[in-house]
Amino acid sequence: MFSRSHRGSTLLACGTALALASGLTACAPEPEAPRPSETPATQPSTPAPTATATPTPPAFDRAAYSIDDPTSLWVVSNKLRPLSPVDFAPQDLDMPVGVENEFSQPLREPAARAAESLIAAAAEAGHSVRIISAYRDYATQVGLYSGYVARDGREAADTYSARPGHSEHQTGLVIDLDDHGDCYLAACFGETPAGAWLAEHAAAHGFIVRYPTGKESVTGFMPEPWHFRYVGPELAAQLALEGTTTLEEFFELPPAPDYAEER
């Protein structure tokens, strides 16, 4: 039998041991919780952008309007292509409004409106422009051409005046323009500020310079920088885009330097 003092010592020793054991247990590091995987989550792949093809604009339709029908805005009249019938007369003639018109000659309605627009735009740009010739009927052309032949001879007349039935003026789609200067119906008109402006801006209003310099062997006529032919804004823009200056070349027609019977 243990004595009371021995018993206390024993309890004390056991308590110290337990305390030491408890302290060691409390100071021991706790096991780490499992970490989430550090491998990045797989992101959904973004498909590569698909190249969108730019739509090709449709080719210009050269057959959209007739080049033979005298009522067509695209009719081509030259020394090899008389109007049919030769005494053709437009049915939609109208007088241009608000513009100076030396001989009060009408135009086909769309050409009359375009002439008003072109001349107004020229005025805004500082150029005073007037019409000095527009529609001429078959009988008028007979008189003019005969007078030129009597004065200058047929060969010379054919370089600057169309024979009756071949004249663009008879289509009602042509205006001759002037700036009240010294180049009335003269080649120098193209070198005037007004003439240069008109040549540059005519296409925006549906007109072209019909008989350009350097194309005499194609059109059959001397350069006429005052002679503007209405073909409509679409064709005028296409001619400008391609850099083609004559209707003969654009429509792949034979050059027309002379009349058929002279070939």
Image (cartoon, rainbow, N blue to C red):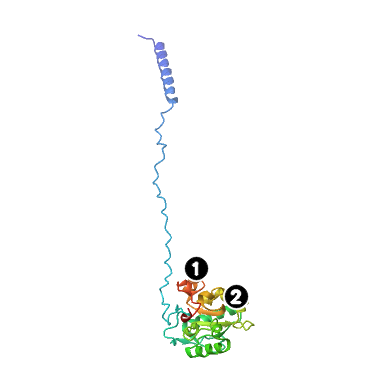
Q: CA distance from mark 1 to mark 2?
A: 20 Å
> Residue 25, located in which quarter of the rendered image?
top left
Q: Position of residue 70 (x, y in %)?
A: 43, 82
Q: Is residue 27 visible?
A: yes
The answer to whether the residues at label 1 and label 2 have Cβ atoms under 8 Å apart is: no
Q: Amino acid at mark 2?
A: Ala
Q: Position of residue 39 (x, y in %)?
A: 41, 37
Q: Is residue 1 above or below residue 22?
A: above
Tag 2 or tag 1, which sits nearer the N-term? 2
Tag 1 secondary structure? helix
Give whichever of 83, 111 is nearer the camera: 83
Q: Position of residue 164 (x, y in %)?
A: 48, 86
Tag 2 secondary structure? helix
Identify the residue under disc 1. 242
Around disc 2, counting alpha carbons within 10 Å, would you say few (fewer than 14), some (14 to 19), or many (20 or more)? few
Identify the residue under disc 2. 196
Give whichever of 13, 107 is nearer the camera: 107
Q: Is residue 126 visible?
A: no
Query: Which residue is the extreme one toward the left?
Result: 1
Query: Which residue is the extreme one toward the right?
Result: 182
Around disc 1, counting alpha carbons within 10 Å, would you say few (fewer than 14), some (14 to 19), or many (20 or more)? few
Q: Is residue 95 above or below residue 255?
A: below
Q: Position of residue 177 (x, y in %)?
A: 57, 82
Q: Residue at x 43, y 21 (%)?
A: 19
Give whichever of 84, 194 is nearer the camera: 84
Q: Amino acid at mark 1?
A: Glu
Q: Is residue 257 above or below residue 136?
A: above
Q: Residue at x 46, y 87 (%)?
A: 93
Query: Which residue is the extreme one toward the top?
Result: 1
